[in-house]
Amino acid sequence: MIYAIAKLAVTNPDAIAKYREVSGAALAKHGGKVEAGTGEFTVLDGSPNVPSIAALLSFPDKDAAVAWANDPELADVHALRRDAGESDILLLG
């Protein structure tokens, strides 16, 4: 199991709403799922750039995560996320 952190600074609520409708199936295609997601944060240390929303994603392994990110059939799904605002996804490992 490998995890990824997704951080989004949402500027287009309509696009993120559409993304939420299709993102679960897109993750599941490669064995991924959302372990936790929130729009509420508590800063424990430092001065981070706090996103609008964040999610902890899991995948069976690194290859599955990379396949999800690079799947040409999911290009429209990833475009919805990018159109929603600024996003970063960091694979932990």
Image: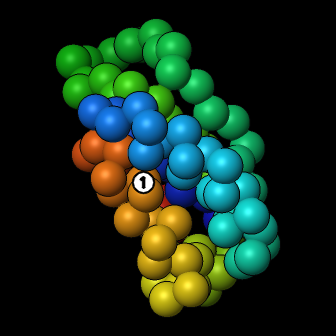
Residues 62 and 78: in front is 78
Horizontal and vertical percent position of residue 72:
49, 89
The kind of residue tagged 1 is Arg
The answer to whether 6 appears left or right of 28 in the picture is left
75 relative to 35 in the view: left or right: left
**What crowding class fits label 1: few (fewer than 14 Cα within 10 Å), some (14-19), or many (20 or more)?**
many
Percent of width and height locating residue 86:
26, 45
Query: What is the quadrant of residue 59 in the picture?
Result: bottom right
Residue 7 location (% of width, % of height): 40, 41
**Residue at horizontal 54%, vertical 51%?**
19
Q: Nearer the viewer, residue 92 or 25?
A: 25
Quadrant hosting residue 43: top left
Question: Which quadrant does the N terminus fall into?
Answer: bottom right
The type of colouring in the image is rainbow
* Residue in view at x 74 percent, y 64 percent: 25
Q: Is residue 60 visible?
A: no
**Which residue is the site of mark 1?**
81
